[in-house]
Amino acid sequence: SGLRQRQLERASLASPGPRESFSTRNLMYQARPQPNAQERERLRVERLKARNEDRVKRLLNAKLRIYGRDTEALEEQSKMKQERLIAEKERELALDKKRVDEANKLVLLHKEQEKQRKLDACQLAAYHKEQQQAKAKRDAEQAAFRRQDGRDRNPNSLFLNFHGEDLGVKERRKMQQQQQQEWIVQQMREKEEARKAEAEMNKRYENYSGAIGGVCEEAEKQKEMDKLRRNMEIQEYNRQLVVAKKMKRNSRKAEEEKQALEEQQITASSKLLTENLNDTYMTGNPNRRIPYHFKGFNSEEQQRILDEQRRQIMEKQDMLAREKEENERYQEQQEMYRRQLVLLEREKMNEQHREARALAHFHQGQKLEKTVQKKHLEKAVYQNPVSPEYFEQFGKSCR
């Protein structure tokens, strides 16, 4: 075309580089194709289907729709359940608080028992220390007495060792046995008192633990009784609901039977629903019927109506067949147009590609020609080397 030729001439005069031709070619492919009528119709149908599917899901979801449900009864049951849960929670909190108090008391009792045991251990250690100090004092006194007296003495006693008969040995042995017996009785009495004190402490601890266990057991029993009572109340409430529902169903059934009986009586006694043809036609004109006493058509009229309906059905089927055939022809024509448009678009794209390649080839030729001219100027014109012959021409005559 002339316009395209002028654009090529302007491009050749401007002599753009290869980068510009590539950018113009890239811009040529950035146009987004618009959907045709069939594509738009398909997208619209898909949107409608998705919307209908969402609507069906909402209608079939029992949590969203409210018709067909006794909302008041459900709300009352939910309220009762919430109150029951709150009461159970408060009861459990009170029981937990009571258990925590008992546990704190038990901890205090443990601490007191441990303190008493430590005190007993400290007293026992002090007693042992006192006995050791007394024994060390006696040993020191014996050692000092032996040092003062130079005679031969027994290291384990204060008595002298004579080389003859000891007349006081019986009294001394008896006194020592009595003293040992007193020490043993005193130690046994102290041990018995410590054992009794420990037994008393253990007995107090067992009694307190038993009391706490009894309280916990009573609380568990009370909880089980409350749970059993709630279950019985729920069963009684459900039984009342069943009885009320049964009574409602029986009353509705009786009402339906009563309405059916009344409808039968009306059907048997009504002039409009009986088959008395004398009440159908008007008294003044037998060819006209009373609108509110119409009893139906005879066989000929009914057959004529059926024939007319059959004829209308056949006409409608023929019309649908013609519409289908026209739609098929229209679709074929649209497909032919689409293919022709695709071919034209392909041809247009091929022409654009060829023009782009010709323009690139032209730019490449100009670039090569310019490169040759530049090399000629740089090597032949701008250098102009000075030769010896140039200087030899001076100083010579031409005669």
Image (cartoon, rainbow, N blue to C red):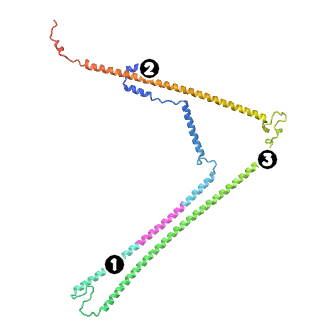
| Sequence-earlier tag: 2 or 3 | 2
- Please state the extent of the stretch shown in magenta in the rendering: 89-114
Q: Residue at x 45, y 76 (%)?
A: 200
Q: Which residue is mark 2?
A: 4
- Cβ–Cβ below 8 Å for labels 3 and 1? no
In the image, 303 versus 233, the foreground residue is 303
The quadrant holding residue 333 is top right
Q: Is residue 158 magenta?
A: no
Label ID, residue 128: 1
**Where residue 212 appears, x then y in whole percent?**
50, 69
In the displayed structure, would residue 4 be above or below residue 310?
A: above
**Where residue 283 appears, x then y in whole percent?**
84, 35
In the displayed structure, would residue 218 be above or below residue 320?
A: below
Secondary-structure class at tag 1:
helix
In-image side of 115 versus 370 (left or right)? right
In-image side of 166 versus 265 (left or right)? left
User: Callout 2: few (<14), some (14-19), or many (20+) C-alpha neighbours within 10 Å?
Assistant: few
Q: Type of residue at label 3?
A: Gln
In the image, 196 versus 348, the foreground residue is 348
Q: Type of residue at label 1?
A: His
Q: Residue at x 22, y 86 (%)?
A: 148
User: Callout 1: few (<14), some (14-19), or many (20+) C-alpha neighbours within 10 Å?
Assistant: few
In the displayed structure, would residue 385 be above or below residue 110?
A: above
Q: Residue at x 76, y 34 (%)?
A: 303
Q: CA distance from mark 2 to mark 1?
A: 126 Å
User: Callout 3: few (<14), some (14-19), or many (20+) C-alpha neighbours within 10 Å?
Assistant: few
Q: Which residue is mark 3?
A: 265
